[in-house]
Amino acid sequence: MINKIQSICVYCSSSNRVKQEYKDVAVETAKIIAGAGKTLVYGGAKSGLMGIVADAALDARGKVIGVITEYLQNLEVDHTSLTESYIVQTMHERKTMMAEKSDAFVILPGSLGTLEELAEVATWRQIGLHTKPIIIVNVDNYWDDFLSLIDRMIEEKCMLEGHRDIFQVIDDPKDIIPALNSFNPDVFDVKSKWD
Ligand code: AMP
């Protein structure tokens, strides 16, 4: 599978105030992506884990594509040294372009923006709009509450059991490449969603 993947989107926090462990994970993630010869796609900001992930990929001689809105350019402060930068008008355009330019998604700690991006690519996967891997890096059990909510959704029959496999959950960025290699795009039957 890994050979088919050219570019990997990383969704993560725009906050500078996160703990060092998360910053280290952002650096390691970027090094792994760049080291594997894959392009990093992300939200184009220079703040928080977003900036760290971009800088670390560039330092490792990786290619980095950023997509930001004109409005956020001022708020988040856009990164000005990327390999390719796109400035779009709306958040929907931004997320669509990021997703279209990516062959896989990796989620690090983040807040509502990251959660929304994760939920969006997951719902698109759920209804079969794409069959790309979605890897949650659950460092320090950061995403446990989200994963518990998924369990509750399944328990309450709001979500199919098989749809848990939309996500691959790993604890350490070292497992990103093995997770991509073991990814099975046919892991569940999309049609069964409405049974
Ligand atoms: P956060 O995880 O909240 O720090 O946000 C991470 C990224 O998601 C940032 O680039 C935000 O601009 C972006 N973001 C924030 N809110 C939204 C939203 N409602 N929809 C899509 N992206 C968002």
Image: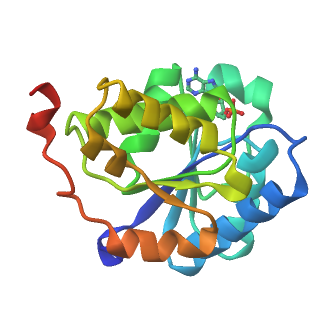
| Quadrant placement of the C terminus | top left
| Quadrant placement of the N terminus | bottom left
Residue 186: which quarter of the image?
bottom left
Residue nearer the viewer, 160 or 8: 160
Q: Position of residue 99 (x, y in %)?
A: 40, 42
Residue 110, placed above or below residue 176: above
Q: Determine whether, in the image, residue 9 is placed left or right of residue 140.
A: left
Q: Quadrant of ligand 1?
A: top right
Q: Is residue 116 visible?
A: yes
Q: Position of residue 42 (x, y in %)?
A: 58, 47
Q: Position of residue 108 (x, y in %)?
A: 64, 50
Rendered residue at 73%/63% (across/down):
25
Residue 95, placed above or below residue 99: above
Rendered residue at 41%/56% (across/down):
104
Total of numbered circles in the picture? 0
Residue 4, placed above or below residue 110: below
Rendered residue at 52%/41% (across/down):
147
Residue sticking out furthest to the front: 155
Residue 7: which quarter of the image?
bottom left
Q: Determine whether, in the image, residue 81 is placed left or right of residue 191.
A: right
Residue nearer the viewer, 87 or 21: 21
Q: Is residue 96 visible?
A: no
Q: Determine whether, in the image, residue 93 is placed left or right of residue 12.
A: left
Residue nearer the viewer, 71 or 92: 92
Rendered residue at 51%/31% (across/down):
149
Which coloring applies here? Answer: rainbow
